[in-house]
């Protein structure tokens, strides 16, 4: 999970995402909603082998399709009945999390 990653801070992630998303979305999303979406993002990363593989090539470039990630998050949020958020609203959270991960060099040594 995200909290197990070295250098990753859940509350800093939530604050970063809140700063990233539009004001009207800030008013709709609770911190718990954001944490839920972040957990789904990291479930996606783990399911694609992007996290937790110490034997992986350190020089390998981490790549994935943002639309595939977004599809995964939207599908699971709908399945779990979390909020009434549309795809574009969830996209802001996904992009905010990706920006946070980049800001802390999560996928780089």
Image (cartoon, rainbow, N blue to C red):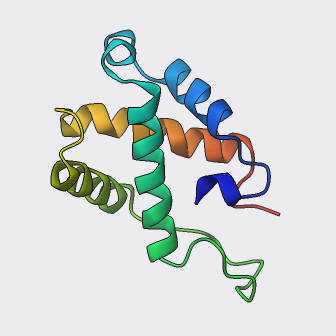
Q: Residue at x 60, y 27 (%)?
A: 16
Q: Is residue 88 above or below residue 19?
A: below
Rendering coords of residue 87 (x, y %): 21, 40
**Residue located farthest toward the bottom when viewing the structure as drawn:** 55
Task: Identify the residue at horizontal 17%, vertical 55% (top origin).
Answer: 79
Q: Is residue 48 left or right of residue 68?
A: right
**Residue at the image position 69 percent from the left and 59 percent from the top:** 4
Q: Examine the image and state in which quarter residue 12 appears.
A: top right
Q: Quadrant of the N terminus?
A: bottom right
Horizontal side of 9 relative to 74 (left or right) equals: right
Measuring from the top left, give residue 57's x and y in whole percent: 73, 85
82 on left or right of 4: left
Q: Give how far across and how far down residue 97 sits, in percent.
A: 52, 41
The answer to whether residue 45 is above or below residue 17 is: below
Q: Is residue 46 above or below residue 22?
A: below
Which image quadrant is residue 75 in? bottom left
Residue under the point 51% across and 22% down: 18
Q: Residue furthest right?
A: 109
């Amino acid at each position: 999970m995200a909290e197990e990653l070295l250098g990753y801070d859940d509350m800093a992630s939530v604050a970063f995402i809140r700063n990233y998303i539009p004001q009207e979305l800030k008013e709709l999303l609770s911190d718990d909603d954001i944490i839920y979406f972040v957990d789904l993002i990291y479930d996606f990363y783990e399911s694609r082998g992007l996290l937790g593989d110490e034997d992986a090539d350190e020089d390998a470039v981490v790549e994935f399709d943002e639309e595939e990630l977004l599809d995964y998050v939207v599908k699971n949020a709908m399945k779990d009945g979390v909020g009434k958020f549309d795809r574009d609203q969830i996209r802001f959270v996904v992009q905010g999390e990706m920006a946070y991960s980049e800001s802390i060099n999560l996928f780089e040594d």
